[in-house]
Amino acid sequence: MPYCSQCGVEVEEDVKKCPLCQTPIQKILPDGQVGPSGPYPSEAAGSPPVPPLTMGEKMAIARTITTIGILIPLLLIAAIDYFINRRITWSSYVIASLTGAWFITLISLFSWKRPYVFTALVHLDILALIYIIGLIAGNHSWAIPVALPILTGSTLIVSAAVNRIRSLKDKGANVAGIILLAIAFLCAVIDFILQAHYHSSHRLGWSLIVLSVLIPTALLLFYVQSPRFSHSRLRKFLHF
């Protein structure tokens, strides 16, 4: 019986294309016989179509990109702060925020089908982030004038993100992208409220660094989810 020259699957005698990869079956004629177009096939076998990414592959890519996209700038910022001040100072805010963003993103990849569980875990992460920032600042008296506005803003941002995720038809890396954008806006809200409370300033500070990391990472995740990624060099580079 003939075999597929591309994937090696054994096929029936009358099959013209491989049922798995759609490669034309090249039949070897007995000695002395010549096919209608000569002793060799008239057309070369084409390349098999690129298989679409599975949900597990998309989630693995999202975890890889998120971890790399957050870990590298986190280490770089900590190194710069330590090199200048000989200890960790202002970068502790950025480290805490990026770590919280990484944790929330992983939560989103495992619990996006259960929005209530996801929302509860996100709020716990936000409370932990507020507590850590309070430890860094050395003052917890800001709980009512600062923590409550932050929680209110986080509730609105998380609710908008959850509703957007639930409305998606094709879920994958774009889920992590939406979460990263929500975290970016949340960090901006936290920074703005802290600046207004402690410094009477209405501008962003450390959150600008967080935004510069999370927004490009989110855009890259949206690209991973797009149809163009299946044929891109980035997929080959990531070995997916």
Image (cartoon, grey):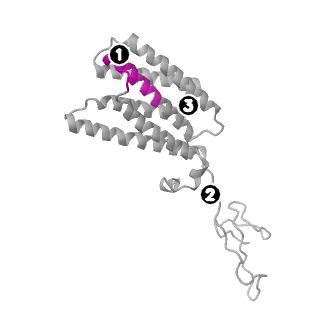
Tell me the element at label 2.
Answer: loop
- Tell me which numbered mark, 1 or 3, is placed earlier along the sequence: 3
- Tell me which numbered mark, 2 or 1, is placed earlier along the sequence: 2
Few, some or many C-alpha atoms within 10 Å of disc 1 (few <14, some 14-19, many ≥20)?
some
Quarter of the figure with residue 135 = top left
- State the separation of the CA atoms marked 3 and 2: 29 Å
Few, some or many C-alpha atoms within 10 Å of disc 2 (few <14, some 14-19, many ≥20)?
few
Asked if residue 191 is among those painted magenta in the image, a careful observer would answer: yes
- Drawn side of residue 234 relative to residue 13, left or right: left
The magenta region covers: 184-203
Q: Is residue 144 above or below residue 128?
A: above
Residue labelled with disc 3? 111
Quarter of the figure with residue 16 = bottom right
Position of residue 192 measured from the top left corner of the image (x, y, whole percent): 39, 22
Position of residue 164 measured from the top left corner of the image (x, y, whole percent): 60, 30
Quarter of the figure with residue 118 = top right
**Residue at the spot 41% in from the left edge and 30% down from the top edge:** 100
- In front of the other: label 2 or label 1? 1
Few, some or many C-alpha atoms within 10 Å of disc 3 (few <14, some 14-19, many ≥20)?
some
Position of residue 91 measured from the top left corner of the image (x, y, whole percent): 30, 32
**Residue at the spot 30% in from the left edge and 29% down from the top edge:** 92
- Drawn side of residue 73 relative to residue 235, left or right: left
Looking at the rendered image, the quarter that the N terminus falls into is: bottom right
Asked if residue 122 is among those painted magenta in the image, a careful observer would answer: no
Q: Amino acid at mark 1?
A: His
- Residue 197 is marked as 1
- Residue 50 is marked as 2
- State the separation of the CA atoms marked 1 and 3: 35 Å
**Is residue 175 at all visible to an observer of this figure?**
yes
Position of residue 195 measured from the top left corner of the image (x, y, whole percent): 35, 21
Q: Amino acid at mark 2?
A: Val
Q: Amino acid at mark 3?
A: Ser
